[in-house]
């Protein structure tokens, strides 16, 4: 049973949107491998990948270019309606061998986020393969760092050392992509989906959009350096829940004002405002590894907190709420425990 307690948080007021406009939502799908023979946790089988694309077609949702769709969404006059973008992290060779031709045959655009330090290594595409794909209509190449490191500032790491590490990882990758491809995009996918406020600030300073691995749809009021994507590996991309993800809507709050994901208490608390669209009696929240969790609500807002501590480096609170058209508002807050070992 949900508990409902009276409490007041002054921080709530600035999260609420006075007037939420007509819907313009972008669902970004995140893939790593397209293969039946690569690590299951980061792989989507070729049959499941094809079935996912078939469902998108059945739902008649347009698949769009990530960069142009993101720019449009944050413009003064965004296109209305539901859209989907397809992304691949790390530039694995399996995408070239098993995914690229499927997408070409269906005329679907997609973006490959490249770890420039890994190109040509075993299991990764070569530069020649990336250049071949980039020459196809609708294929874009973007920055996934040089080295795929854990980029949040480490405990005990001097600020100057961290800034030097970040500059080297972000800018050397962008420079190499600029040299090898005709254009370079202002898109960055965080390695492991990990970010903190300081790293977000570095991404913003460069004028880039930052994409994580927390789930949810993107709307005009989404934080531009913490944009969500739905992981589509075998465990998360099964068809029985995919329709809700593909049709999901951005949570109607300004997500740039949500807390830094670096955990300072275990379990952490997430405070959400009430809006016209979001009411406690229709809200459902989940925590990684714990399933559905309770929350505390009053007339002033909602506090989400797991019932017990987490013991992993990355975990999330996911909250959904039905809209009035059969879809779900979807929010995911990622937390990062820097005391836990790196992958």
Image (cartoon, rainbow, N blue to C red):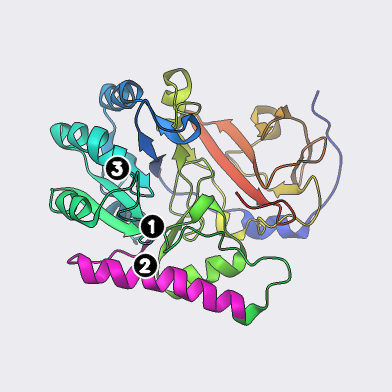
Q: Give the number of the disc on residue 21.
A: none
Q: Is residue 115 left or right of residue 99?
A: right
User: Within 10 Å of the Cα at label 2, are there few (<14), some (14-19), or many (20+) other Cα atoms?
Assistant: many
Q: Are marks 2 and 1 in contact (CB under 8 Å)?
A: yes
- Label 2 element class: helix
Q: CA distance from mark 3 to mark 2?
A: 19 Å
Residue 148 vs residue 317, the one in the foreground: 148
User: Within 10 Å of the Cα at label 3, are there few (<14), some (14-19), or many (20+) other Cα atoms?
Assistant: many
Precedes in sequence: disc 2 or disc 1: 1
Where residue 152 sits in the image (x, y, percent)?
60, 63
Which residue matches tag 2?
A: 173
- Label 1 element class: loop
Which residue matches tag 1?
A: 115
Residue 304 vs residue 145, the one in the foreground: 145
For image coordinates 54% across by 37% down, the residue present is 330
Residue farthest to the right? 6
Precedes in sequence: disc 3 or disc 1: 3
Residue 212 at least partly seen: yes
Of badges 3 and 2, nearer the viewer stands 3
Q: CA distance from mark 2 to mark 1?
A: 7 Å
Which residue matches tag 3?
A: 93
């Amino acid at each position: 049973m949900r508990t409902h307690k009276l409490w007041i948080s002054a921080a709530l007021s600035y999260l609420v949107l006075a007037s939420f406009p007509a819907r313009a939502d972008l669902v970004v799908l995140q893939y790593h491998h397209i293969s039946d023979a690569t690590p299951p946790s980061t792989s989507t089988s070729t049959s499941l990948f094809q079935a996912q694309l078939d469902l998108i077609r059945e739902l008649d949702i347009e698949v769009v270019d990530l960069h142009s769709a993101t720019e449009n969404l944050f413009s003064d006059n965004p296109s209305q309606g539901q859209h989907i973008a397809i992304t691949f992290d790390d530039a694995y060779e399996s995408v070239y061998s098993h995914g690229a031709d499927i997408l070409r045959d269906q005329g679907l655009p997609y973006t490959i986020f490249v770890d420039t330090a890994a190109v040509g290594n075993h299991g990764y595409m070569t530069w020649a393969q990336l250049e071949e794909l980039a020459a196809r209509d609708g294929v874009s190449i973007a920055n996934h760092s040089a080295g795929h490191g854990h980029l949040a500032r480490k405990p005990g790491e001097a600020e100057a050392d961290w800034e030097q590490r970040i500059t080297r990882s972000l800018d050397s990758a962008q420079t190499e992509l600029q040299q090898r491809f005709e254009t370079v995009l202002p898109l960055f996918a965080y390695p492991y989906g990990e970010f903190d406020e300081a790293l977000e600030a570095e991404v913003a300073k460069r004028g880039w959009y930052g994409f994580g691995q927390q789930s949810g749809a993107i709307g005009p009021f989404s934080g531009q350096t913490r944009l969500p994507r739905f992981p589509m590996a075998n465990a998360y991309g099964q068809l029985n829940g995919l329709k809700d993800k593909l049709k999901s809507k951005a949570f109607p709050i300004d997500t740039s004002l949500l807390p830094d994901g670096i955990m300072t208490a275990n379990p952490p608390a997430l405070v959400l405002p009430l809006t016209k669209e979001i009411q406690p009696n229709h809200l459902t929240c989940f925590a990684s590894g714990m399933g559905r969790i309770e929350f505390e609500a009053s007339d002033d807002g909602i506090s989400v907190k797991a019932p017990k501590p987490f013991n992993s480096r990355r975990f999330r609170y996911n909250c959904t709420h039905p809209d009035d058209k059969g879809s779900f508002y979807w929010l995911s807050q990622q937390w990062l425990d820097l005391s836990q070992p790196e992958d």
